Image (cartoon, rainbow, N blue to C red):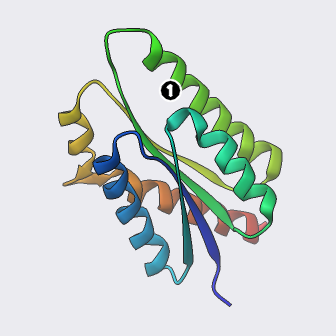
């Protein structure tokens, strides 16, 4: 039976979300995993969605994906901090590897640069989950 992985993705920037999911899905599937994708409103909701997935007992790990682009207010800072801290807490509280694949950037151009070329944030998030699952099994 293949390992199952969840991808939770904030769809606020839908085109970026689709590219992130495609990269993460590709890595999980290349590793022989089955993937279930859950789209949610935005990055702020990622920790709760990750917790739902982790608590379900159905997944070896969760890749948390999304994008937050800085605007003119402090909203960016609050959303980024809440997402990062919440995702980390889910992993620590449940023992289920949860990766932070959220683009936290100043501009759309910066976001796009992290979706191709040398690095792909979605792929990196999936690889982090796979490595942590392997570490958990090894120990």
> How many residues crowd around disc 1 within 10 Å: few (fewer than 14), some, or many (20 or more)?
many
Residue 132 to residue 5: above or below: above
- Residue 22 spot, x, y in % from top left: 36, 65
- Residue 85 spot, x, y in % from top left: 64, 30
Residue 96 visible, this orientation: no
Identify the residue at image location x=60%, y=38%: 45
Residue 71 visible, this orientation: yes
Single out the residue that lies furthest toward the front: 41
Query: Where is mark 1, residue-wise?
Result: 80
Q: Quadrant of residue 73?
A: top left
Residue situated in front as seen by the camera: 40 or 71: 40
- Residue 126 spot, x, y in % from top left: 49, 61
Quadrant location of the N terminus? bottom right
Residue situated in front as seen by the camera: 27 or 79: 79
Residue situated in front as seen by the camera: 138 or 119: 119
Q: Please tell me whether mark 1 sits on a helix, a strand or a loop.
A: helix
């Amino acid at each position: 039976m293949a390992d199952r992985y969840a991808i939770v993705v904030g769809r606020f920037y839908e085109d970026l979300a689709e590219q992130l999911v495609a990269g993460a899905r590709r890595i999980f599937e290349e590793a022989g995993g089955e993937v279930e994708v859950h789209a949610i409103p935005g990055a702020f909701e990622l920790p709760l969605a990750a917790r739902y997935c982790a608590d379900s007992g159905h997944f070896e790990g969760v890749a948390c994906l999304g994008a937050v682009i800085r605007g003119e207010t402090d909203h960016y800072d609050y959303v980024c901090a809440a997402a990062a801290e919440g995702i980390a807490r889910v992993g620590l509280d449940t023992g289920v590897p949860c990766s932070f694949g959220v683009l936290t950037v100043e501009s759309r151009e910066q976001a796009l640069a992290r979706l191709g070329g040398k690095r792909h944030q979605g792929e990196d998030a999936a690889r982090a989950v796979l490595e942590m699952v392997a570490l958990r099994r090894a120990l």
